Image (tube, coloured by chain):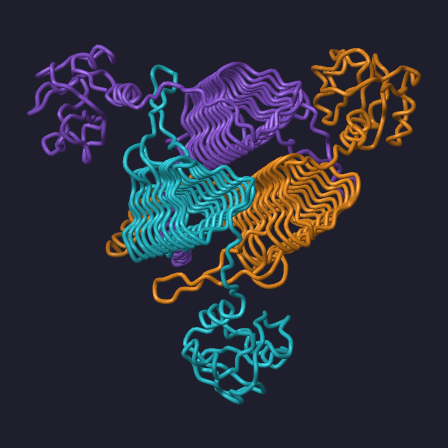
Chain colours: A cyan, B purple, C orange
Amino acid sequence: MKKRLKELAQWVGGTVVGDGEIEISGVAAIEEAQAGEITFVANPKYLPKLSETHASAIIVSKEVTQADKPLLCVTNPYLAFAKILTLFSHKPYQPKGIDSNTWISPTAKLGKDLTFYPFVYIGDRCSIGDRVTLYPGVYVGEDSSIGEDSILHSNVSIYSGTILGKRVILHSGVVVGSDGFGYVKEGKKNVKIPQVGRVEIEDDVEIGANTTIDRATFGKTIIRRGVKIDNLVQVAHNVVIGEDSILCAQVGISGSTKIGSNVTLAGQVGVVDHTEIGDNVMVGAQAGVTHRLPPNQGYVGSPALPHREFLRANAVFSKLPEMRKTLIEIEKRIKKIEEALSSGGKEK
Amino acid sequence: MKKRLKELAQWVGGTVVGDGEIEISGVAAIEEAQAGEITFVANPKYLPKLSETHASAIIVSKEVTQADKPLLCVTNPYLAFAKILTLFSHKPYQPKGIDSNTWISPTAKLGKDLTFYPFVYIGDRCSIGDRVTLYPGVYVGEDSSIGEDSILHSNVSIYSGTILGKRVILHSGVVVGSDGFGYVKEGKKNVKIPQVGRVEIEDDVEIGANTTIDRATFGKTIIRRGVKIDNLVQVAHNVVIGEDSILCAQVGISGSTKIGSNVTLAGQVGVVDHTEIGDNVMVGAQAGVTHRLPPNQGYVGSPALPHREFLRANAVFSKLPEMRKTLIEIEKRIKKIEEALSSGGKEK
Amino acid sequence: MKKRLKELAQWVGGTVVGDGEIEISGVAAIEEAQAGEITFVANPKYLPKLSETHASAIIVSKEVTQADKPLLCVTNPYLAFAKILTLFSHKPYQPKGIDSNTWISPTAKLGKDLTFYPFVYIGDRCSIGDRVTLYPGVYVGEDSSIGEDSILHSNVSIYSGTILGKRVILHSGVVVGSDGFGYVKEGKKNVKIPQVGRVEIEDDVEIGANTTIDRATFGKTIIRRGVKIDNLVQVAHNVVIGEDSILCAQVGISGSTKIGSNVTLAGQVGVVDHTEIGDNVMVGAQAGVTHRLPPNQGYVGSPALPHREFLRANAVFSKLPEMRKTLIEIEKRIKKIEEALSSGGKEK
């Protein structure tokens, strides 16, 4: 596929500086781009690299107005790059049909134009939408439904009663609907609380490899529209994740916690059970959220503090030995002064 | 199924306040419960919700003695709830037989009334107890044994030589018996230490999705009776977990460490190798256990401190910038005083 | 298999103290070793146990020169133990052939002497080297290649376009080549950045159960020769891990970060994106690496500090409440002194 630069500008809503007629055949990173390809500079500190790249055109922000090469100037270069890369890398869906070495319940309801690889299992009364792709080793337990255009990669496990929306992508090894971790002590013994709820995942959610989403004790664990979850994340029973939120790798959310919309939790963040994180909150890597976080703020640390407060306190942390030494010295000096004053008093 | 309230009271060892003859047909959370269902209040702060629920009866603690609705009064409402929910949600086991699309070694010893789904693999000389359920994609390596009434969910991997007790539940993606992580440096190269031990999991253990339990270098990694492990937990080679202990999601236990009985490790806790955690210890979320923890205490922090000590120290953490400022001021004031005193001396 | 002690000494480059003619038939830990077996003492503090073991010979460091039993004296007892254990536990490879219940693309190129278990899937145009073992449930996406003598355990997922070197070992549930976690916000919506790169894993790499390695956005995520990765580790898109480095369980490396060679990251370490860790660095458990770490040093803490600096600061942490009290007291004493001095001045 080839596109003229001016066509790409139209596609992403930008303007061309230089020759808009040149043909672009692909997208690449600034160091690897070759003639015929377009690249991008999202971070102004990389602007000096503009003169070194072999790319034929460069996506830049609107502040950049001249260069040796044709420019595509946009408000958000990274977004324009994503859209152009999607344009070039997108392969139209071609259904491969249903392999004979699958096990599909006669009571399952199947859409059209499906792609089921070998070793797929579909349980009783499942409902599979049009153009769904199931890679080898996918297990779909009974009474589950999968919305159209969804892709479940190899070895994904969907427990019974799970609801997946449209255009959901689950990467390899994802487990959805496993039992919530609920026990109550009878003496020292752990008595299991049956987990009779389910999981609902809304449209346009993508979930990373080997992430686990537990079913609810009662009711539903809910992942709302547009949520993106990275690899090896744990989402416990009855959690609700609001629209467009982002959970980075190895995050863990404990039971019954509600995460607002447009929240970002960085890698390895942990959140306690039965709490709430407000909309638009950002939590820094490895933070431990132990209580309710109001919306529209940044937090970091374990236990989590407002971002600035943590940074200021943490800046002092490495100075603690010195502070302690100073404190001990000061005590001595004060004692000396006090003694001098009291003997001075006596001397009077 | 329906039960009279007085029958439920007998089942859990409680007493009825109000009409014991009403019929209960299910269990639900307090907000969702409908007429005919029973709900529960374990936390006294939710008692005000009693008047709002649509449930026909409520499980409460013995201190509660009156309400608009029939009460089931017990010592531990949460436990009674778990038992009644089990009563209502339990489905008697129905063997489904062995699907033809499995691979079972002719030397494997199979019990009766089994449920083997398609795409199950059973290696040579394995022994599978009565009423075992193996979901699609389960792999059982040679010389392993699985006790009766155990359930292995989809895509579980059991390496060779593993021993599973009775009523063991392994959720999807669990790996048991993978090689311990043992290398020794020869110069900079990592020389692998063969892992020739195995894993033994005792009766009534439940293990969450995508958790990994490594085989021992020599001897056994042991998970004792009644242990409950959440999702994405790492248990290294030669670890021993004592009876009835609880490991929450994303916990990591390093090699050769011994965890006592009735221990609780909260989410994302890490424990170093070759150490020991005493019986009845509770470790708070994200704590880092770097040395032996005596029994019967709570710990938190990384490195872990006794619970109270950590809370007191941590309360000061966010005040560090202010403390530092005070310290610098104090130094100035002392200097001034010292100068005043010494010049005072000179003036004399 | 039996070997004389003097033969073992030759094998590992050590010297015998005592009877070199005795026959050794196996290796065991010091407590479990029986007559006919050899054991080892790597840590001098276990030397007193020498007299208690039932082993027939003991591997020790060169400083030990006498004991009741024959000794094998070497520079590095742990290394010699690993080599002798390998000698005794190694089983020569026996190809089992290709099970009929596999799905192999007619365009795949297969080496000789293979072992493919049931339920294996090999995509179009894959290339599989000689003596490769694929356990049940392994999925290999199209255009991937696997070098000779590699072993992929059950339920491993290899996405399309992945390159695996020789003698690579992937434990159960490993996912290689899943999409990198890349989105860009358009308003609040997350627009996916297509991940068009791949993963390359070089020779002699071993990766633990349920670990995930994401493909690059462009170019390659690279795991270099001899790297050893433990269970449940996350390696993001475009990461490069240098030769012979060790990543312990539950480590997380964010996108585009470069790890040097011979680095050790202990359990649950997190590393931010777009940073660099120098050669021979050691990072302690649960540390959070937030910026570039120069080579040849140890770091710990979150955010990570040089090892000693962290230990010194952390030693003060639990003394913070006491320091705060002291500080408040000191302020009062100074105030008193200042008042005394100023009233003294007035009195003059």
Between B62 and C127, the one nearer to me in the picture: C127
**Which residue is rendered at x = 21% and y = 10% of the image?**
B10
User: Is residue C310 in view from this perspective?
Assistant: no
Between B98 and B22, the one nearer to me in the picture: B98
Q: Residue B25 occupies which quadrant of the picture?
A: top left
User: Is residue B42 in view from this perspective?
Assistant: yes
Q: Position of residue B313 (x, y in %)?
A: 39, 39
Q: Position of residue B284 (x, y in %)?
A: 41, 33
Q: Which residue is most to the left?
A: B68
**Relative to residue C135, is residue B192 drawn left or right?**
right
What quarter of the picture does the C terminus of chain A occupy?
top left
Q: Position of residue B213 (x, y in %)?
A: 56, 29
**Which residue is rendered at x = 73% and y = 47% of the image?**
C128
Q: Residue B185 occupies which quadrant of the picture?
A: top right
What quarter of the picture does the N terminus of chain A occupy?
bottom right
**Relative to residue C171, is residue B31 drawn left or right?**
left
Relative to C9, is B145 above or below?
A: above
Q: Position of residue A90 (x, y in %)?
A: 51, 65
**Which residue is rendered at x = 40% and y = 43% of the image?**
A288
Relative to B128, is A111 above or below?
A: below
Number of numbered markers: 0
Relative to C102, is A245 above or below?
A: below
**Relative to residue C285, is residue B184 drawn left or right?**
right
Between B95 and A228, the one nearer to me in the picture: B95
